[in-house]
């Protein structure tokens, strides 16, 4: 009997059906799914994720993405929407680390997972390989980040413990990301991205008007002087 190959499923928080229904009824739409896309120009595959979710007073659900070392990634596009607590930004990258959190009052569930592309053989379409980096159950943060303690939102994260009551430390490189997502699951009727950042504007190439002279410095040797080139 041949042993079946073990496949790494796309990791996300597993929520009871009743919890999913309550989130949908509250109008909170968090989309942890990651897809594989192919870029024709660069002839490469990339991962596509959606920063999404939000909160109402009683609970919240949110996911976002960062780089392998916890660095903030620029969004590819930030769609406008007529509703809140849904999609906020889309990110494209060869590797993504997802940070997903669920809050119910002051109790938190947290999942940090790394997602990479791997092909079984050269030239084959890659698949998503996922690895759990941190899973926290029933974390506690006895603050009201929705209203009373909003000033510390984005600067604090819930505490997680082992079954024996010992504190579990968050991976240091992802503390900033967890704090951002913690703020997001307390963001009432969220309509903006909390972790993905605005991309840098493209660098503009300076145009020289026709007939003008553009001067530029060159490396000079043997006492030579910089030259000026006339355009047009």
Image (cartoon, grey):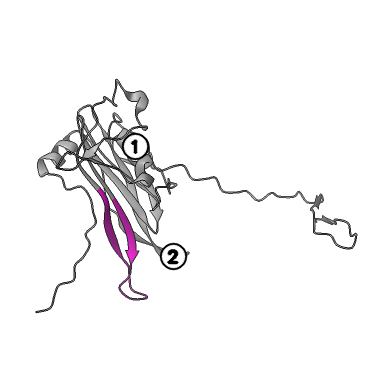
Give the position of the N terminus as an image quadrant. Answer: bottom left
Most foreground residue, 112 or 125 = 112
Count of picture labels: 2
Q: Which residue is mark 2?
A: 40
In what element is the residue under mark 2? loop
Quarter assignment of residue 187? top left
Work out which residue is located at the far bottom of the displayed protein and give it. 1
Give the position of the C terminus as an image quadrant. Answer: bottom right
| Mark 1 vs 2, N-terminal side | 2
Residue at the image position 23 percent from the left and 29 percent from the top: 56
Find residue 98 and report its horizontal and vertical position in percent. Answer: 31, 49
Residue at the image position 74 percent from the left and 50 percent from the top: 208
Query: Label 2 crowding class (10 Å Cα cut-off): few <14, some 14-19, many 20+?
Result: few
Q: Nearer the viewer, mark 1 or mark 2?
A: 1
Q: Is residue 232 left or right of residue 88?
A: right
Instruction: Identify the main secondary structure in magenta.
Output: strand
Quarter assignment of residue 158? top left
Mark linked to residue 192: none
Whether residue 87 is visible: yes
Residue at the image position 34 percent from the left and 29 percent from the top: 153
Work out which residue is located at the far right of the displayed protein and give it. 223
Quarter assignment of residue 197? top left
In what element is the residue under mark 1? helix
Find residue 194 and report its horizontal and vertical position in percent. Answer: 37, 37
Give the magenta part as a residue range: 113-134
Find residue 77 and report its horizontal and vertical position in percent. Answer: 42, 46
Q: Which residue is mark 1?
A: 179
Most foreground residue, 100 or 207 = 100
């Amino acid at each position: 009997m041949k042993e079946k190959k073990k496949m790494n499923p796309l990791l996300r928080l597993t929520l009871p059906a009743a919890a999913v229904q309550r989130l949908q009824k509250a109008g909170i739409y968090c989309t942890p799914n990651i897809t594989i896309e192919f870029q024709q120009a660069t002839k490469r595959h990339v991962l596509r994720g959606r920063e999404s979710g939000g909160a109402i007073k009683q609970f919240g659900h949110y996911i976002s993405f960062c780089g392998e070392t916890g660095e903030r990634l620029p969004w590819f596009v930030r769609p406008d929407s007529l509703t809140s607590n849904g999609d906020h930004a889309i990110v494209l990258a060869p590797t993504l680390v997802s940070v997903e959190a669920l809050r119910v009052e002051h109790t938190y569930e947290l999942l940090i997972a790394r997602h990479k592309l791997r092909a079984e053989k050269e030239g084959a379409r890659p698949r998503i390989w996922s690895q759990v980096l941190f899973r926290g159950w029933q974390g506690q943060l006895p603050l009201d980040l929705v209203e009373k303690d909003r000033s510390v939102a984005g600067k604090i994260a819930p505490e997680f413990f082992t079954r024996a009551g010992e504190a579990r430390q968050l991976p240091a490189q992802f503390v900033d990301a967890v704090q951002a997502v913690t703020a997001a699951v307390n963001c009432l009727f969220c309509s903006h991205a909390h972790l993905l950042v605005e991309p840098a504007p493209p660098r503009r190439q300076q145009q020289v008007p026709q007939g003008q002279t553009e001067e530029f410095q060159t490396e000079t040797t043997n006492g030579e002087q910089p030259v000026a080139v006339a355009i047009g």
